[in-house]
Amino acid sequence: MSRKVMRRRAGFTLIEVLMVAAILALLAAFAVPALMGAGDRAKEDMAKAAVGRNGPIASGMKRYRFDVAIYPDSDDGLRALYERPDSIDADSKKWRGPYMDGTYEELLDPWQQEFQYKSPGEFNESGYDIWSVGPDGEDGTDDDVKNWLEK
């Protein structure tokens, strides 16, 4: 008779399984909302790092300015970090680029949009303005990621 009792107790009861499922559902209810925004926050942080003062674009811009003595103008844009601008003679020793790895076509924000660039800057008057249009893809909205502080 003890064998029969042991065989019946070898599995979990329905109540035990339901309790474990309820605990897992409760844990998921707290964890999932916290994780849902993590991807969006990570993309925003990546964009901030790219346009920030110590980011890869700023480093390329500093090297460009060191060699050429000015930042690329708005017409040349960020492409000047990869290819010699027409405004600089081919014989000139000024441009020593490329100033960034990869290609200009690869220089996209985390939402696969081109970075926006203006020089001289409207907000950084002695430098340049660079920004990402953010997740909505529209310029001038609250989700834009910029290299300047709002006043």
Image (cartoon, rainbow, N blue to C red):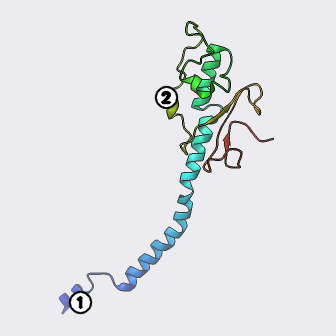
> Where residue 99 appears, x then y in whole percent?
55, 22
Of label 1 and label 2, which has the lower sequence position? 1
| Residue 128 drawn above or below residue 19 | above
Q: Which of marks 1 and 2 is in front?
A: 2
Identify the residue shown where x is 64% and y is 43%: 133
Figure check: 85 above or below 49: above
Give residue 146's quadrant in the image. Answer: top right
**Residue 36 circle label:** none
Q: Are marks 1 and 2 in contact (CB under 8 Å)?
A: no
Amino acid found under the numbered disc labelled 1: Val
Mark 1 sits on what residue? 5
| Residue at figure coordinates x 56%, y 40% from the top left | 109
Disc 1 packing (10 Å; few <14; some 14–19; many ≥20): few
User: What number is the disc on residue 103?
Assistant: 2
x then y, percent, for residue 22? 46, 77
Measured as percent of width and height from the top left, residue 46 is found at: 57, 42
Q: How many marks?
A: 2
Quadrant containing the C terminus in the rendered view: top right
Q: Is mark 1 on a helix, strand or loop?
A: helix
Q: Residue 43, position in %: x, y?
A: 56, 46
Up/down of 107 relative to 9, above or below = above
Where residue 12 sits, quadrant-wise, is bottom left
- Decide which of 2, 75 is in the foreground and name it: 75
Pick the residue in front: 129 or 90. 90
| Residue at left offset 54%, top offset 21% | 83
Q: Give the Cα separation between the discs numbered 1 and 2.
A: 72 Å
Q: What residue type is labelled 2?
A: Thr
What secondary structure is marked by label 2? loop
**Picture quarter with the N terminus:** bottom left
